[in-house]
């Protein structure tokens, strides 16, 4: 095969067509044959891929009145005008000029118009770098963290924040308690605000891109994730402590994960999963919620103890997602028909959101999420994630 070679070639002259007219024609045609259904690329040779100009600038009304379509009505005074030229491959040019009755002026003009409109639309598509910031703030141990637009913009580069569409979910005004009413009010607030995402207009064929910045109790983060459908493109961000920022580190991630079955229970429909990543929930501390009936599984960091610094890069989050999906698939297989999975997460915020978003409503069991609450004396069940 002849290798592609960069070299300069001139626009093929056709009966004194002005150079600037040829330039416009080639550009508007995208360098492709404008015959409807052909679309052959005309600036390289098929099949050798050698670069060259293999296009022909065909006249819709023939250059000569005696030529094909030369005597049709409305013949232009400027026969070499852009509107009277159509870019064709040699085969299509020969076909339309040999069969002028089958390819009259009206047909060729339609070919030209449809092709050039399509090229214009396609070349007008650009990568949409806009992202809608979704900010969830809740009290954690009685404290909250402010997240500024400036911090978020630095984190999402090269994307840019669509500040006017920003979704803010502020749970800090809801009295923090271990009561069921707290969780009901908080989840209703999340539902109401997330619902606004789906009314934001997007280009046809595009998905809305959302950047999530969230700090709140873990069960509410899981719940938030369950409300972010696959109709959205979602990017999750982590608040890092060293240095303090929301930017993912650029170097390759190092964290790895492993799933272990800690014990086998007497009832295959009773299953608990410990996510011991940023902290540790000991299996012995799960009582009285998890008894001898329960099989207990654990996802931990491979090769190191649980710590708060393991999640520094996007790839760290991606690898957790892969391990979590494998774990859930294994639990579904071993415990066929499982209705509810008891979940004990000690994880960073983006991992919690990812867990909720990863649940397949028609396939996976519901998630009963536990939270550590000193006021209630330890681990307590909070939210059951069941909604589709």
Image (cartoon, rainbow, N blue to C red):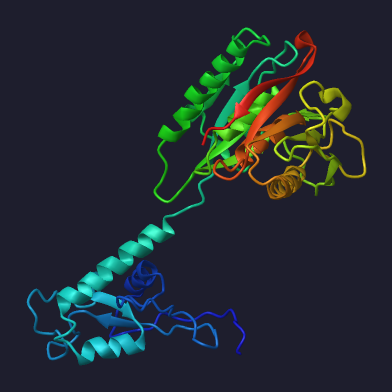
Tag count: 0
Residue under the point 82% across and 22% down: 287
Given residues 273 and 289, the one toward you in this image is 289
Camera sees residue 149: no
Relative horizontal placement of residue 294, taking residue 156 as reference (left or right): right
Looking at the image, is 235 positioned above or below residue 279?
Answer: below
Q: Residue at x 62, y 85 (%)?
A: 3
Who is closer to the viewer here, 303 or 106? 303
Q: Residue at x 28, y 91 (%)?
A: 94
Q: Nearer the viewer, residue 177 or 245?
A: 177
Q: Is residue 82 above or below residue 299?
A: below
Residue 182 visible, this angle: yes
Q: Quadrant of residue 344?
A: top right
In this picture, is 235 found above or below 223? below
Residue 358, quarter of picture: top right
Residue 296 left/right relative to 62: right
Residue 244, image quadrant: top right
Residue placed furthest toward the left: 73
Q: Quadrant of the N terminus?
A: bottom right
**Residue 96 in the image: x percent, y percent?**
24, 86
Image spot of residue 223 (x, y percent): 60, 28
Q: Is residue 377 left or right of residue 47?
A: right
Tell which of 302 and 106 is nearer to you: 302
Residue 386 image offset from top left, x and y in percent: 57, 32
Does residue 84 appear to the left or right of 301 in the view shown? left
């Amino acid at each position: 095969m002849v290798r592609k070679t960069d070299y300069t070639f001139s626009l093929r002259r056709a009966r004194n067509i002005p150079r600037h007219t040829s330039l416009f024609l080639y550009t508007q045609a995208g360098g492709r044959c404008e015959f409807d259904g052909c679309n052959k690329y005309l600036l390289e040779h098929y099949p050798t891929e050698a670069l060259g100009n293999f296009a022909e600038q065909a006249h819709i009304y023939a250059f000569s009145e005696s030529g094909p379509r030369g005597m049709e009505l409305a013949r232009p005074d400027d026969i070499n005008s852009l509107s009277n030229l159509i870019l064709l491959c040699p085969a299509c040019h020969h076909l339309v000029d040999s069969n002028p009755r089958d390819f009259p002026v009206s047909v060729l003009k339609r070919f030209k118009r449809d092709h050039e409109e399509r090229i214009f639309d396609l070349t007008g598509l650009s990568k949409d770098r806009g992202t809608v910031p979704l900010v969830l703030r809740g009290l954690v141990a009685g404290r909250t963290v402010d997240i500024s637009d400036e911090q978020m913009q630095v984190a999402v580069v090269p994307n840019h924040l669509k500040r006017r569409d920003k979704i803010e979910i502020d749970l800090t005004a809801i009295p923090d308690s271990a009561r069921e009413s707290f969780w009901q009010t908080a989840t209703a607030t999340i539902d109401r605000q997330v619902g606004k995402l789906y009314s934001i207009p997007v280009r046809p064929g595009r998905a809305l891109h959302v950047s999530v910045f969230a700090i709140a109790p873990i069960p509410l983060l899981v719940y938030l994730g369950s409300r972010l459908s696959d109709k959205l493109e979602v990017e999750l961000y982590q608040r890092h402590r060293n240095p303090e920022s929301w930017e993912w580190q650029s170097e390759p991630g190092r964290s790895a994960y492993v799933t272990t079955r800690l014990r086998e229970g007497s009832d295959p429909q009773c299953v608990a999963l410990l996510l011991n990543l940023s902290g540790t929930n000991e299996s012995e501390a799960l009582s009285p919620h998890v008894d001898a009936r329960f099989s207990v599984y654990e996802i931990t960091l491979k090769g190191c103890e649980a710590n708060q610094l393991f999640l520094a890069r996007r790839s760290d989050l991606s690898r957790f997602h892969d391990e979590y999906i494998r774990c859930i698939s294994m639990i579904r297989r071993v415990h066929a028909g499982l209705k509810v999975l008891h979940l004990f997460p000690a994880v960073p915020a983006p991992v919690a959101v990812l867990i909720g978003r990863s649940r397949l409503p028609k396939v996976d069991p519901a998630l009963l999420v536990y939270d550590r609450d000193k006021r209630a004396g330890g681990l307590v069940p909070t939210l059951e994630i069941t909604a589709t």
